[in-house]
Amino acid sequence: MAGLVLDRADPTAVAVVGAIRGGDLDALGRLLAMNPGLATARIRAVREARTLLHVVADWPGHYPNGAATVAALIAAGADVHTRFSGSHAETPLHWAASNDDVAVLDALLDAGADIEADGAVIAGGTPLDDATAFAQWRAAHRLVERGARTSLWHAATLGLQDRVEAYYRGPGPEADRALWGACHGGRRAAAEYLLDRGADVNWLPPWERLTPLDAAVRSGATDLAAWLRAHGARSTAA
């Protein structure tokens, strides 16, 4: 059954997805034993296919026994580096990062998942790019703790002030983007540092029409939003 592809309505696919989402390790074990190669199978839908490790990390994440499910699938032959087939090429680690599922994230990393894997829906980047863009803060900080490489954007968005100061190279697009990230993350110290050094307080990103002020308001950072307004920040809603 190597290279097995199952339609999502196939009874075996329905059963194994149900076992994973329900955290039923006994049922999962029986299905894996009865269907050699199932651990590496892909579940197919229209124009896309995901693996069982993707199912464990799928939205909304945090399924019961997630870490143990990852271990069981890998013990049965699942590939921790496997990619989604479809509109992107994300790994299961990207999905765990996007759902703030730290338990599954740790289990995947413990099994050898590439913390710097590319292919994210966010600019083809890493799991950390997904976590910071989608405001999945626990997952983002865990990835940093476990050695993920960071940029000025990541540092500002996560409030890693020492790294913000180490990475800053002067005003320009990188600093403007980082200021927006600091506001997206509600990180006033990083925002102050960058604005004081010339970052554009009203910069608009290419991915959505929100200024740094709008990003701060969306994040619930009311003090930061008030500070931004006092420094000339505007909203696109104005």
Image (cartoon, rainbow, N blue to C red):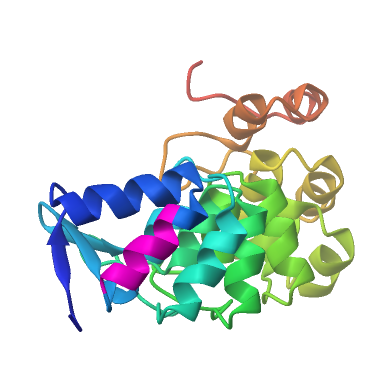
Query: Which of the 4 image quarters holds residue 225?
Result: top right
Who is closer to the viewer here, 80 or 40?
40
Q: Is residue 118 left or right of residue 233?
A: left
Q: Residue at x 83, y 45 (%)?
A: 192
Looking at the image, the residue that sits furthest to the top is 238
Who is closer to the viewer here, 25 or 100?
25
Query: Which of the 4 image quarters holds residue 56?
Result: bottom left
Expressed as whole percent of the image width and height from the top left, the position of residue 88 reads 28, 64
Q: What's drawn in magenta, residue-wise?
A: 27-35
Q: Is residue 227 left or right of residue 96?
A: right
Expressed as whole percent of the image width and height from the top left, the position of residue 139 reads 66, 55
Expressed as whole percent of the image width and height from the top left, the position of residue 210 reads 50, 34
Q: Would you say residue 160 sits in the magenta stretch?
A: no
Q: How many marks?
A: 0
Q: Would you say residue 30 sits in the magenta stretch?
A: yes
Q: Is residue 37 left or right of residue 48?
A: right
* Residue 172 is at least partly visible in this image: no
Viewport quadrant of the N terminus: bottom left
Q: Is residue 186 left or right of residue 84?
A: right
Query: Which of the 4 image quarters holds residue 89?
Result: bottom left
* Residue 2 is at least partly visible in this image: yes
Q: Residue at x 64, y 40 (%)?
A: 184
Q: Residue at x 83, y 59 (%)?
A: 160
Who is closer to the viewer here, 27 or 80?
27
Kindly report the secondary structure that dominates the magenta region of the rendered protein.
Answer: helix
Who is closer to the viewer here, 61 or 17?
17
Expressed as whole percent of the image width and height from the top left, the position of residue 131 reads 58, 54
Q: Residue at x 38, y 62 (%)?
A: 30
Against 65, residue 109 (above or below) is below
